[in-house]
Amino acid sequence: MVIEVARPRPLWQILFSTHHTDVALLYLITSIVFFMLGGALALTIRTELLTPGTTIISDSDLFNRIFTVHGTTMLFLWILPFISGVGNYLIPILVKYKDMAYPRLNAVAYWMAVPGAALIWLGWSDTTWMAYPPYSTMRAAGPAADMWIFGLKILGLSSILGAINFIVTILKCKHPDLPMMKTSLLVWAILVSSLMTLAALPTFTAALIMLYTDRLGVSGFFDPARGGDPIAYQHLFWFTFHPEVYIFLIPAVGMAYELIPKFSRKPIFSYGSGVIAFLLLSIIGFASWAHHMLATGLSFTEKTVFMIGTLAAVPMSAMHVFNWMATMWGGRIKFAAPMKFVIGGIMLFFTSGAGGVVNTTLPLDFITHDTYWVVGHFHMMLMGTVSFIFMGFLYYMFPLITGRMYSERLANVHFWFAFIGTAVVFTAMHIVGLYGMPRRIWDYVPDPTIIALNQIASIGAYLIGIGMIVFLIVLIRDSVKGKPADMRDPFGIGEIYYDYRRREPHH
Amino acid sequence: MGSHVIYEWIYVGAVVSLLIWVGAEAWYGEKLLHEVPKDHITIKVTGQQWFWTFEHPDGTREVGTLHLKAGKVYKFEITGKDVIHAFNIPHFAVMIDAVPGRINTIWVKIPEDAVGEYLIQCREYCGLLHYNMRANLIVEA
């Protein structure tokens, strides 16, 4: 137990610790704080879009900054730190090692995320989280855009250090009596996503430097007037960030594999197909980046190649879904909060997956591209699937972290508000996209259908907001006042819980 | 378990065949759209912060409004002057980026009965007034 609220440790002991559970705790708390802050920005955006014209934000400049910080926060300060937090907690336990391979590097990686986050939140850039040049190099206001660049640079380095640590811990520090094929699929997930991070991130790191020197005016990599090409940035960017989508998704899939067999009280249907799907996806994930760029004027051959590359990644996700369903089939399922969030996540995964096929299907992409359809699509994935599984997993880890049990009743309220809200807001966004509403706009055409759909979406967002307030209440109240958990079997599903005796930090 | 794995392979096979079918249809559809009909009229489109300029083949220019004739085939040659924009007529599903330093083309056949006024908008984030970077498309008989 790390937050021993009953027997507290001085704060500095946690802050300066290199123990994996302490670093994990810092990662988790940071990620949840930014999840809430990013969510508050999302609600501000939805409130502004409630009516055409000014609703609460007086000008589009502030609006553009808000959605930029919202996107950057949710991806780099919620999803990535949460994965690192869960990985730090559980990877040493799951591979039976005393700590991460490099504890100090681990703490350094966490503490690098802090200035990165500060730069993004103090800078308040308006470049969008993609920062496409020439806008980001020639028109975006400094110092905000420069701070954004440096913030992402630091966060990228932090990710790379974290990835190296996970890879070495899993491959080199795993207990010799534990073969790789007997480890949890969560271990595989973290291993595969860390390897993908190492392969994908350096490209964006290079692109950020080029972006910065272009901003300084000493180079013209992306400036057509100086022989550069703005589209080159998009290739570099998406070469990193399409695989990054799978870096977000794969750990969530691993967490689902960790939860579903336990709460269905059945072994995984096919462990092998899970591993194969992870490995194949980690390779094929690199063959589809330019489907984000189908409307930039790619040649017919390029478009065909990237459509095939994208469609080729679908069977792997389908294999995971099949595996989950087959594991649940005939099991005695215990519908505790973790399982509810996973099942909700799988249901929304269908929608986002089907929407993804539509996006890459060439003639249809030109209808959906850069409309609210796309916003609905990737939120359905990142909120509906990834964040849902994360929240479920946080409930599962709650006894491990606090030694206490959360309130199942309030968690249920949280789930239903979040689930209904997510389904409503992002479905409405899909539809309003088909009516041609572009993304990233402060004001829209006052057409009755578009107004109605935006208002439905905002109501859905408020439902999520209520769910998140309940979530926050559960987290804070029950880590202080919750019933002490039965640490051998907190969920009453058999004695398969993690080794909770790692309570004493040893260095 | 061994005998059950066959179900997974059947399922994966079904998913793959479905995807091949979707991909083939999409490829065929895109191929049809790829070839511009011969009797087209070329319109040069320039996007800049935050308005659209259109140039007809006879050299006349329009800003913020585009007049086209129903029943004709138009090819748009699109470029951006400062940052990336995207030329979009939602009603006719016309959409392609306006990239500085490049000319992207897209074509559309305006139906005979489409006389009226339609929205032209920018669909790629281009800064302060991106939300309002609109123009009027007027289709005349």
Image: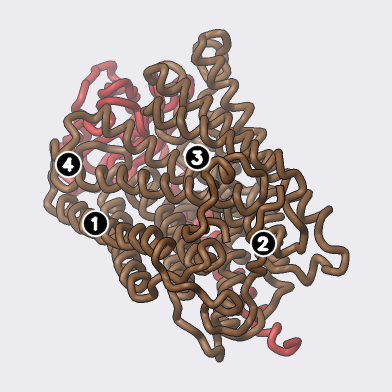
Q: Is residue B122 visible?
A: yes
Q: Amino acid at mark 4?
A: Val
Instruction: Tell me the tag on residue A338.
Output: none
Question: Which chain's residue wears label 2?
Answer: A
User: Where is residue A13 shown, x and y percent of the image?
Assistant: 59, 44
Closer to the camera: disc 2 or disc 1?
2
Q: CA distance from mark 2 to mark 3?
A: 48 Å
Q: Are marks 1 and 4 on the same chain?
A: yes
> What kind of residue is marked 1?
Tyr
How far is the residue under mark 4 from the one under mark 3? 26 Å
Any mark on residue A462, and which? 1
- Residue on which the image places disc 3: A293
Q: In this view of the protein, which residue sits in the foreground, A113 or A287?
A: A113
Secondary structure, mark 2, is loop
Q: Amino acid at mark 2?
A: Arg
Q: Which residue is mark 2?
A: A502
